[in-house]
Image: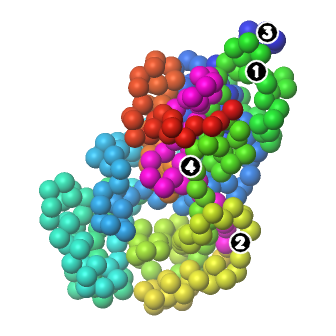
């Protein structure tokens, strides 16, 4: 085996939003970390728009752990901004565009309920902020966006400064070996491994018993002149302002699609949906596509393997990853380093009856 000085406390597989924030939290606890990633530009993290919204519009409910996450999510990233010397977090209200009168009624009723008043304010059609709102809308106040690519790029530079070793190469599960209590990957040695590999879970023989789904999604960069950029705009589809009359627009949802190849008809489908409520001319600038890891129960996968207690997983964050990691990554580091129990809703022990990992 390699000398003790070359053995890591943790090897993290995957340098997306989950793996990178966990690496930062473990480093704060004095652990020696390596993080391995293939650096694909079309990964779900690097393609994500980074929206953070305390509301779930499809059923007019608060997002999971909303009241615990959103009081501090912006401060979490602002602390990293200060440390990295970079800018990537933005506080921007989300304007939910009502599609019909029933939609207006549902959101208005919810905004008057206890627990929702601090999150929602109805907008009358006459107070449209220069936007097309024939049925009015609702402002979600504690929302914003994370420039995920900028955050990750700044984090990688910080890794190099503080001794978190980032290894840019493909990871093959078949090359992982165990010697006594240490895992090896060629000349890399680690006591524990955390798999934060997104849809790479499908190829993972240790954790592929978990019910991870994949939803293919398209994100467009659009040019729309004369559309106010004071809000994130959301109907079912959404528009995120990125400056200079440019917007990110999304997203399509194609279940079990692992393709990363953009298809023109998916972009056309989205643009037609935007044209239903955006009167300005919409020009397509670019088109990206990536599969997102999802969980049918809307709860992520965290915890240790049922047989190998030095193998762990961090996956299934879905479309709320940018906000969820601010809450989950510090707590996961507490679990990994101090043994503080995970929330049962995210602990993979909830799938113990279906385990069939190696």
Tag in front: 1 or 4: 4
Whether residue 185 sits left or right of residue 97 in the image: it is right
In this rendering, does residue 307 appear at all?
A: yes
In the picture of the structure, the residue carrying the numbered disc 4 is 211
In the picture of the structure, the residue carrying the numbered disc 2 is 262
Q: Secondary structure at mark 3?
A: loop
In the picture of the structure, the residue carrying the numbered disc 3 is 3
- Disc 3 to disc 2, how far (Cα)? 46 Å
For residue 133: magenta? no
Mark 3 residue crowding within 10 angstroms, few (<14) / some (14–19) / many (20+):
few
Magenta segment? 287-316
**Image: 235 above or below 41:** below
Residue 89, x across and y down, in percent: 47, 51
Residue 59, x across and y down, in percent: 32, 67
In the picture of the structure, the residue carrying the numbered disc 1 is 178
Query: How is the protein colored in the picture?
Result: rainbow
Q: Residue at x 19, y 54 (%)?
A: 115
Q: Secondary structure at mark 1?
A: strand
């Amino acid at each position: 085996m390699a000398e003790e000085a070359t053995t890591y406390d943790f090897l993290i597989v995957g340098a997306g939003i989950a793996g990178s924030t966990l690496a930062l939290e473990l480093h704060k606890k004095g652990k020696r970390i390596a993080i391995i990633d293939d650096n694909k530009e079309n990964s779900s993290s690097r393609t994500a728009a980074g929206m953070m919204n305390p509301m779930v519009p499809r059923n007019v409910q608060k997002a999971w752990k909303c009241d615990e996450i959103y009081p501090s999510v912006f401060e979490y990233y602002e602390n990293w901004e200060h440390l990295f010397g970079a800018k990537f977090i933005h506080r921007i209200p989300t304007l939910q565009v009502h599609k019909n009168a029933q939609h207006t009624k549902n959101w208005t009723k919810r905004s008057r309920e206890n627990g929702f008043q601090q999150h929602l304010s109805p907008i009358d059609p006459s107070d449209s902020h220069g936007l097309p709102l024939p049925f009015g809308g609702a402002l979600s106040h504690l929302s914003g966006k994370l420039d995920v690519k900028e955050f990750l790029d700044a984090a990688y530079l910080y890794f190099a400064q503080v001794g978190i070793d980032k290894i840019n190469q493909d990871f093959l599960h078949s090359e992982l070996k165990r010697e006594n209590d240490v895992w090896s990957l060629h000349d890399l040695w680690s006591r524990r491994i955390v798999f934060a590999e997104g849809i790479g879970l499908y190829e993972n023989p240790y954790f592929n018993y978990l019910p991870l789904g994949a939803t293919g999604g398209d994100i467009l960069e659009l040019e729309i002149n004369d559309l106010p950029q004071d809000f994130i705009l959301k109907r079912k589809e959404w528009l995120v302002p990125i400056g200079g009359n440019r917007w990110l627009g999304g997203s399509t949802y194609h279940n079990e699609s692992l393709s990363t190849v953009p298809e023109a008809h998916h972009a056309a489908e989205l643009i037609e949906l935007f044209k239903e409520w955006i009167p300005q001319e919409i020009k397509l600038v670019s088109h990206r596509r990536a599969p997102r890891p999802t969980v049918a129960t809307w709860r992520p996968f965290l915890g240790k393997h049922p047989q190998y207690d030095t193998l762990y997983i961090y996956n299934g964050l879905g479309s709320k990853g940018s906000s969820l990691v601010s809450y989950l990554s510090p707590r996961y580091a507490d679990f990994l380093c101090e043994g503080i129990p995970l929330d049962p809703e995210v602990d993979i022990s909830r799938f113990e009856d279906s385990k069939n990992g190696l």
